[in-house]
Image (spheres, grey):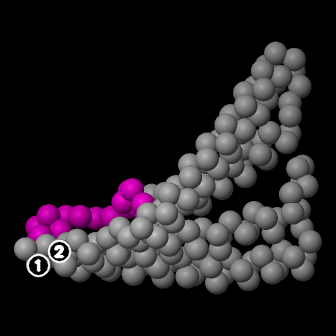
Amino acid sequence: MTRGFRRIDRWLSLFEEWTLFLSVLAAMIALFFNVILRYGFFYSLAWSEELVREVILYTTFVGCSAAIRSRATVRIDALVQLVPRLQYPLALFSHGVHLLFAAILIYYGIQLCALQVKSGQSTLILNIPTVYLYALLPLLGVLMTLRVLMMATVDIRARRSAAER
């Protein structure tokens, strides 16, 4: 990877790892106290369940970008094992599908955010404006686009260096 890609990768990784860590930690603490209060004092915190639901959404979306970096996305590699020459074309096809998915997330995510701004909706208990939740979609699309471009560059350079040998 180039120096610029390494810097972007480092910042994206830092953002992904720390926000995932902090959000899951907050959800676990809230859920832990909710269980203690529910079974120990017969009192329940309604907001903790909503927080956990939002954290699950967030970790799913941001985890998609992290999965691309570690090449942990779902793929069927039986064809690659049978015909190894298809590894590079199928990798490029996979990158293209990821980019298409990222573009769809950006496009429709922006439309959903605009709709949420117009409607002014918020979550029931925590009163979080839903535009913040829907803003995860274009954010994920941008993160995925950056990750896919970096991984595709790595694959293309590896292919070129292997061809030069």
> Percent x, y for residue 135?
73, 69
Is residue 79 visible in the rendered image? The answer is no
Q: Which residue is pictured at 39% across the width and 56% down the height?
A: 70
Find numbered disc 2 in the image and state the secondary structure of the residue it sits on. helix
Q: Is residue 160 left or right of residue 59?
A: left
Mark 1 and mark 2 in contact (Cβ < 8 Å)? yes
Q: Position of residue 47 (x, y in %)?
A: 85, 42
Please give left or right for residue 117 compared with residue 108 in the image. Answer: right
Reading the image, the residue beneath label 2 is 161
Is 59 rendered above or below residue 29? below
Q: Which range is magenta?
A: 68-84
Q: Quadrant of residue 129?
A: bottom right
Q: Position of residue 81 (x, y in %)?
A: 14, 64
Q: Nearer the viewer, residue 1 or 43?
A: 1
Residue toward you, 106 or 46: 106
User: Residue 39: percent from the left, percent from the top?
Assistant: 79, 19
* Label 2 neighbour load within 10 Å: few <14, some 14-19, many 20+: few
Q: Is residue 55 visible?
A: yes
Per the image, is 57 magenta?
no
- Residue drawn at the location 45% of the way across and 58% of the way down: 67
Q: Is residue 122 left or right of residue 23?
A: right
**Residue holding disc 1:** 164
The N terminus lies in quadrant: bottom left
Work out which residue is located at the far left of the displayed protein and give it.
165
Residue at 87 percent of width and 17 percent of height: 41
Specify the quadrant of the image occupied by residue 95: bottom left
Mark 1 is surrounded, within 10 Å at the Cα level, by few (under 14), some (14 to 19) or many (20 or more) other residues, namely few
At mark 1, the secondary structure is helix
Indicate the amino acid at tag 1: Glu
